Image (spheres, grey):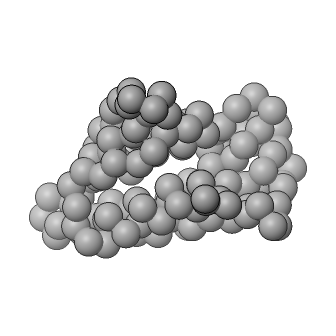
Amino acid sequence: MLTDPISDYLTRIRNASMAGHLVLDIPSSKIKKGITKILFDQGFILSYKFENTADNQGNIKIALKYDKITKEAVIKKIQRISTPGLRKYASANKLPRILNGLGISIISTSKGLMTGKQAVRENIGGELICYVY
């Protein structure tokens, strides 16, 4: 039994990119699908596909993105911020800038998952899920 499925999701992405895997499979959930869509929209992953399984949980198939010349993973660091034991919240004016705007923070707000820049634009705060750069 996993106590923190989001940390497991982020760790699987981190491990697969460090090992040089092209594709990885992750058990699906609503929040994981949202994070995957944000990572794709921001250009951190190449593509994704949501698959149905026999147990109705579903599966997320993610194609990781690598630099064409240096063969390094696009995701340099992916870090969980708010954990089940210690939740971290931030208001719209206190949201952090990641690598001076080059990275993203993923925020869970009352209007759904969004990047930190979107949350500042809409002037809403929320729970800091993770940082990606």
Say whether residue 61 is left or right of residue 89: left
**Residue lying farthest to the left in this orientation:** 69
**Which of 83/127 is in front?**
83
Q: Is residue 13 positioned above or below 110 on the image?
A: below
**Which of 126/61 is in front?**
61
**Which of 58/70 is in front?**
58
Percent x, y for residue 43? 38, 45
Residue found 59% across the figure and 34% down from its top: 30
Of the 4 image quadrants, the one containing the N terminus is bottom right
Does residue 16 appear in the picture of this structure?
A: yes
Does residue 41 appear in the picture of this structure?
A: no
Say whether residue 93 is left or right of residue 46: right
Say whether residue 46 is left or right of residue 60: left
Percent x, y for residue 114? 64, 38
Q: Quadrant of residue 4?
A: bottom right
Residue found 40% across the figure and 59% down from its top: 13
Percent x, y for residue 86? 82, 67
Q: Quadrant of residue 58?
A: top left
**Which of 52/82 is in front?**
52
- Tally of numbered tags: 0
Residue found 26% across the figure and 71% down from its top: 19
Q: Is residue 36 positioned above or below 102 on the image?
A: above
Residue found 48% across the figure and 65% down from its top: 11
